[in-house]
Amino acid sequence: MNTRTLCTMISSLLTLQLSLALRAASPDWIAETELYPHVAENGAGFGTSIHVSANEAAIGAPFRDAGSSVDEGVVEVWRHGAGGWQFSDEVTLEDPVAGVAFGFAVAIDGNRLFVGAPFYGAVTGTPESGLVAYFQYFEGQAVPWSGIGGIGGAEGDHTGWSIALDRGMLAIGVPGPCETCGPNSGRAGKASVSLDFDDGAAWANLSPTTLIRDGDRYGHSVAVHRSDDGVAPDLAVVGAPFHDSGAEISGAAYVFANETHAVDGWHQVATLAAPTPGAQEMFGLSVAIGADRVLVGAPGRDAGGTTDAGSVFVYVPDGAGGWQQQAELFLSGASIGDRFGTAVAYDAQHGWLVGGAPDRVTTVFGGTGQTGVAAVFRYDTSVSHWFETAELFSHDLLSIGQYAGAALAIANGRVYVGAPNYDANPNNGISDSGRVLVFAPDEIFDDDFE
C-alpha cells in the first residue's frame, strides 16, 4: 500500500467518524402530528403550499372545489394552542371562479394573509394572468378573513405562482410564460418586492442584469430575508429553472441586495448556476435565503450516474458583496428519480437545511414505495462540511404515493412537510386529498412555541 492510498483511507475514516459523531449529537426527530384537511376532497392537493408564522399556519389546497366552482382552491388557516394545532378558518375567493388554483402559494403574518391564484383571469378576459389576493383578519366577524385587495397581471403572467414573506417584506413571482403572446414576446418572467406591504404599497421590480429569455420562468420561485438589524442588507433570490445556463433547461437563480432599505435600493449581486450544468436539471425550481446562506434546489440533477436524484446548492457571502458556492448536497444513498431539491427551507437559528425529495422510495409498515422525504442537513464548523442527519417521512402504508417534500416550512423548531398526494380514503374515491406532516426534534418537543 503506497502512502497516498493510506492517507486517502485515513481521511475517509476520519470523515466517517465525524459524520457519525455529528449524527449522534443531532436530535432524534419525532413525528409530532399530522394535519389533515378540514374537508377531504378527491384531488384537492392540501399541502401544495405551506407557510407558518408564530402560532399560525396557512395551508393551500389549490385544487379543491369551492361550492360549484371546480378546482377553484381554498386555503385553510390553522392555529396552535394548548391542544396543539387546530383548524381555524377556511378562506376562499369572494366571487367563485373555477380552475384558478387559489392557494397554489401562501404567506401569513399575524392578521394578514396572501394567497396566489396563478390561473386566475379567464372571467376578466385575461386568461391565466394570475392574482395575489390579500386578506385581513377581523376577529368576531361571521367571515373573519375579509378580502381587501389583489395584485393582478397581464395575460399568461401566472401572477402569484410564488410568494415570499419575511417580517412585512413581501415578494411575488410572475413567471409566465404567455403561451398566446407569440415568440420573442419578452415574456421571460418577473418578480417584484415590497418592503412594507399594505394596500397601495410601493413595489420594486427585481430585474436581472444578465440576459433572460422567453420561457425562462423567472419568478417560478422567490425568497426574501429582511435585515435582522437594519444595518445588513435586505436580500432576495429569484429562481428561473427553465433558463439555459450552458444546457437546455439547466436553470439559474439571481440574488439581489438592498443596503439602503429603500424601495429603489434593490440591485443584483449574483447570478447563480450549476458549475457543470446538465439538461433538464431545473436549478432554481426552489430557493431559500437567510443572512448567511442561499439555497437553490436542482431536482433534475444527476448524482454521479444516478439520474434525476437531485441536489441542493449552498452559497455563502464571498466577502465582496457577492455569493460563492459552499457546497452541493446529495441524499445519502441517492436513487434514480428522488428529485431532491424540489423544495428547500433554511433555519439559521437551529442550523437546519431541509430539502424535499417527493419521489424518494422508503419502506413503511406494510410495503415499499415512493413516500417522499424531507432530508435534514447540519453544518459542522469543525470540518467545514454539511452532513445529512435525518430523513423525515411517515411510516403508514398510505404514505406511498403521497409526494411528501413537495412543500416545506420551518418555524418554532418544527419542520412542516407537505404531502399533497396523500389518499385520505382511496376505498371511497378520495385520493390526492393531501396532508401536512409535522416533525420536531425531541430536545425542543414542548418549548419552542411562542
Image (cartoon, rainbow, N blue to C red):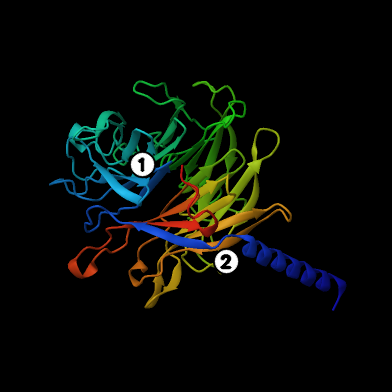
> Relative to residue 420, is residue 280 drawn left or right?
right
Q: Position of residue 363 (x, y in %)?
A: 44, 74
**Where is residue 89, by image quadrant?**
top left
Q: In the image, which disc is placed on residue 78?
A: none
**Helix, strand or loop under label 1:** strand
- Establish if 179 lies above or below 24: above
Residue that label 2 marks? 332
> Relative to residue 195, is residue 148 drawn left or right?
left
Other-residue count near label 2 (Cα within 10 Å), few / some / many at <14 / 14–19 / ≥20? few
Nearest the viewer among 442 and 186 is: 442
Kind of residue sitting beneath label 1: Val
Instruction: Specify which label sits upstream in the sequence, 1 or 2.
Output: 1
**Helix, strand or loop under label 2:** loop
- Establish if 302 lies above or below 247: below
Identify the residue shown where x is 23% and y is 57%: 40
Residue that label 1 marks? 106
Real-space CA distance between mark 1 and mark 2, rounded to the nearest whole angstrom = 31 Å
Q: Position of residue 15 (x, y in %)?
A: 72, 65
**Where is residue 185, by image quadrant?**
top left
Q: Position of residue 160 (x, y in %)?
A: 35, 38
